[in-house]
């Protein structure tokens, strides 16, 4: 008997062990940009992102993962940012989001 094709599947589990992640670089970024800690992950930055309209770039996703110590691919993703500054204009917490982009690029080049 063949398996039924339902047209959808169950996502693979993706858990994070925050105790095992190296959050040193994320703490360095937070030390230089404390306001980043006030992010409420609302997604306004991603919704308005110029690069996100043209590519798969999702700024909120990347910087939220970085904050949790998940750095893989973050530097490469941030290279898609054009530093246009629109995200900063809409951020309800007034975060210097362009500064976050630049710090991630500076601190995470090795990841
Ligand atoms: S718009 Fe500001 S508060 Fe909202 S997810 Fe982006 S950085 Fe965080
Ligand atoms: S500065 Fe970068 S992350 Fe922010 S809206 Fe522009 S392209 Fe997107």
Image (spheres, rainbow, N blue to C red):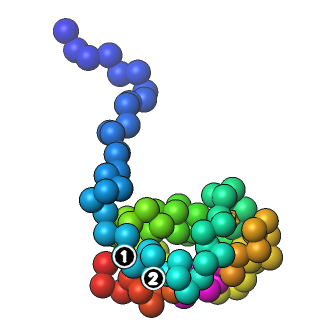
Name the mark on residue 92.
none
Determine whether label 1 and label 2 are within 8 Å by CB. yes
Position of 93 with respect to 29 (left or right) is right
Considering every residue shown, the one lying at the far bottom of the view is: 106
The answer to which quarter of the image holds residue 51 is: bottom right
The residue that appears at 61% across and 78% down in the rendered structure is 34
Position of 72 with respect to 33 (left or right) is left
The residue that appears at 53% across and 82% down in the rendered structure is 31
- Mark 1 neighbour density, 10 Å: few (under 14) some (14–19) many (20 or more): few
Position of 35 with respect to 64 (left or right) is right
The residue that appears at 70% across and 75% down in the rendered structure is 95
Find the distance from the CA under tag 1 to the CA under tag 2.
6 Å
Q: Is residue 36 above or below residue 10?
A: below
Quarter of the rendering occupied by the N terminus: top left
Residue of label 2: 28
Residue 70 pos. (x, y %): 37, 65
Name the mark on residue 24.
1
Q: Main secondary structure of the magenta part?
A: helix
Residue 111 pos. (x, y %): 31, 78
């Amino acid at each position: 008997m063949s398996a039924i094709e339902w047209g959808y599947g169950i996502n693979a589990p993706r858990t994070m062990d925050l105790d095992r992640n190296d959050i040193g670089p994320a703490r360095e970024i937070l030390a230089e940009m404390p306001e980043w800690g006030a992010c409420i992950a609302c997604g306004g930055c991603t919704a308005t992102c110029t690069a996100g309209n043209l590519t798969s770039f999702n700024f909120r996703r990347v910087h939220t993962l970085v904050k949790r110590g998940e750095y893989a691919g973050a530097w490469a993703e941030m290279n898609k940012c054009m530093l246009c500054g629109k995200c900063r204009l809409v951020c309800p917490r007034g975060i210097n989001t362009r500064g976050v982009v630049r710090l991630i690029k500076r601190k995470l080049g090795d990841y």
